Amino acid sequence: MERVEVLLDEATVNKRIADIGAQISKDFEGREVHLICVLKGGAPFMCELAKRITLPKVSLDFMSVSSYGSGTKSSGVVKIVKDLDEELEGKNVIVIEDIIDSGRTLSYLMEIFRQRHPADLKLCTLLDKPEGRVVDDVTVDYVGFEVPDEFVVGYGLDYDQKYRNLPYIGVVKFD
Ligand code: IMP
Ligand code: MG
């Protein structure tokens, strides 16, 4: 059985999310913002972040993708399980992700979103693992924290569907 060690505690994570919310509110002043959550991992982050954006017009949509398999590495093959409900044409879109590791999932998704002609398209991730990157076409606009190349869970991130509910970010240790 694995155990989880705290990497970023609840107060630290929530403070950083509040800061990103304030930054987005400033960057998009006078505009409407459409947040897209990549399920399931992005959901807790999106909920917390959306509350910290003070703009008057914020809308939310959800997309579910699966990258096949339940191990600790993304396969790079992405399947859309549930597409967005709304069109992106002309909208100021911010894509909300839990973590960017190899970047394959986001490289694929951002291209799909780009083809739907949003007015603006930004990427916001709670965690970034720059050492894991294998693609070079993913630009991240808002990053919560950079994390080392270890398997992390909590705040939406899972290990075999567990630990998504943790209010902090932890590292999985396999003894
Ligand atoms: P990428 O395609 O390699 O960038 O990986 C993207 C997806 O893999 C993320 O959205 C997560 O679902 C999953 N993932 C990558 N690293 C981790 C991790 O450390 N913990 C939990 N999930 C991870
Ligand atoms: Mg994910």
Image: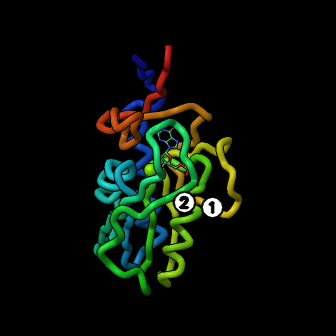
Query: Ligand 1: does it lie within 8 Å of the C-beta at label 2?
Result: yes
Residue 135, percent across and down? 68, 56
Of 94 and 22, which appears nearest the observer? 94
Identify the residue at horizontal 38%, vertical 48% (top origin).
Answer: 41
> Residue 25 has which mark?
none
Secondary structure under tag 1 reads: loop
Residue where numbered disc 1 is placed? 138
Query: Ligand 1: does it lie within 8 Å of the C-beta at label 1?
Result: yes
Residue 15, percent across and down? 40, 43
Q: Do labels 2 and 1 touch, CB within 8 Å?
A: yes
Residue 139, percent across and down? 62, 62
Q: CA distance from mark 2 to mark 1?
A: 7 Å
Identify the residue at horizontal 38%, vertical 66% (top origin).
Answer: 36
Of 83 and 152, which appears nearest the observer? 83
Query: Taking 73 as reference, is 51 above or below it?
Result: below
Circle 1: residue type: Val
Question: Is residue 11 visible to us here?
Answer: no
* Quarter in which the N terminus is drawn: top left
Secondary structure under tag 2 reads: helix
Label 1 CA crowd tier, 10 Å (few <14, some 14–19, many 20+):
some
Q: Quadrant of residue 150?
A: top right
Of 70 and 90, which appears nearest the observer? 70
Label 2 CA crowd tier, 10 Å (few <14, some 14–19, many 20+):
many
Residue 79, percent across and down? 45, 61
Question: Is residue 121 visible to us here?
Answer: yes
Residue where numbered disc 2 is placed? 106
Identify the residue at horizontal 45%, vertical 64% (top origin).
Answer: 95
Query: Taking 2 as reference, is 147 above or below it?
Result: below
Whichever of callouts 2 and 1 sits on the residue coming sooner in the sequence is 2
Circle 2: residue type: Leu
